Every structure is written in structure tokens, then in C-alpha cells.
Image (tube, rainbow, N blue to C red):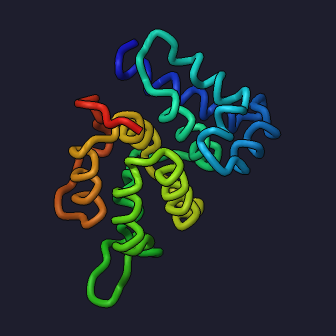
Amino acid sequence: MQHNSLLNAVESWRQWLHSDHGDRGARARLKRCESVFDALLEPETHRLIASVHGNYVPEQKLAILALVLARVENTANYPTFADALGLTREGTIPTGDARPRLSPMRFSTLLRASEDADEFARALRRALAILGDTRFNVRRFIGDVLFFTDQTRQKWTFEYYHTRRADATEDTQPQEETQL
């Protein structure tokens, strides 16, 4: 499966989960999951895994996405996830005493948590809770989580601190995969 097809499959699953035809009960159960293993016990996670068949993607990463995408209803082209975390509550780049939505310490914790699937899922959920209803580029987010590498970590730091503007419509291309 090509990279774009993979992203399309995951995004289609997310849209279905949040649609009127989706399973509200499954979405609620995924929101209550406390671990990646709990998500793997949910049939809807396996529906997501089946939708990307023929493509090697670690099931843990798909389970992480099932956990977090159950909480992401809307999308936008901009900002990216890391951009949104680094903006103020008013949606501006912090200057002076203004603080980003997600503190630099929590942002660092999020990036460092990517080595452990459960910690990464928890950190992503915390960040999503802080964002609330703020829209961000979900397609980029999906690609970043699926192919989370040191390069992704670095890209997120530049986006969070708004020191280098990445093209918000650009998809993350898989480089090397990190083991979870």
C-alpha cells in the first residue's frame, strides 16, 4: 500500500468513526481505553488494522491512532499538531509573557514518550485534551504518528517553536521506523 493510500485508509476510518453511521459506542470505548492493549481488544481497532492490510505498519501504532483519533472529530489544513500545541490559547505565536497551550516541559515529555506505546498514547491524549476543539491537520498527524522518527521529533520542535514553517499540506514520508 502506498503512503498516501495508507493515510487515506486511516483518515477514512476516523471519518467513519465520527460519522452518523459510525459506532458511537465503539468511539466511547476507545476513549475509555487505558492502554494500547485495551485498544487492541476493541473490534474497531481491528477494523482499522484490516483497512491497511498489505502494508507493514506496526499494530501498536495503529492502536495508538485508534485511541487518539477517537477524540479528534474535525480537521484543518493548518496548523499542524505541533504548531497548534505551540500557539497561545488565542491562536497566536507566543511573544513576551504569552505562553503556548502546551508547556515546553509537557511538549518535551510528549516527544520523549514516543519510545513506549502506552506513554506515547497518554501524552498524545493529554495534548489533545489541552487543544480541546482546536482543529489541526489530522492527515499530517496520522503520518507523523505512523512514521515517528528522530526526524519527526525535530520537525515537531521547529513547528512548536515556530522557527521554521513546514508546508501544512505536505505529507510525512516514511523514513525509518522506530520500534514501540
**x%, y% of residue 142?**
44, 38
Q: Quadrant of residue 171?
A: top left
Q: Residue shown at 58%/42% (left/top)?
A: 69
Residue lying at the far right of the rendered structure:
25
Residue at x-position 44% and y-position 48%: 116
Query: For the view shown, which residue lies furthest in the left direction?
Result: 164
Q: Can residue 171 be spotted in the picture?
A: no
Could you say which quadrant of the image residue 22 lies in?
A: top right
Point 70% across, 43% down: residue: 30
Q: In this view of the protein, which residue sits in the foreground, 95 or 177?
A: 177
**Residue at point 34%, 59% (across, down):** 83
Question: Which residue is situated farthest in the top direction here?
Answer: 54
Q: Position of residue 119 (x, y in %)?
A: 49, 54
Instruction: Tally the numbered discs.
Output: 0
Q: Is residue 38 above or below residue 13?
A: below
Q: Quadrant of the C terminus?
A: top left
Up/down of 104 relative to 109, above or below: below
Answer with left or right where residue 122 lies relative to residue 42: left
Residue 86 place in picture, x, y as percent: 35, 67
Question: In the displayed structure, does residue 34 sit left or right of residue 156?
Answer: right
Give the camera-side residue of 119 and 140.
119
Query: Is 19 situated left or right of 130 in this image?
Result: right
Question: Residue 18, position in %: x, y?
Answer: 69, 38
Q: For the N terminus, give its image quadrant.
A: top left
Tell me which corner region of the image, top left, top right, bottom left or bottom right, holds residue 58. top left
Above or below residue 36? Residue 45 is above
Residue 88 in view: yes
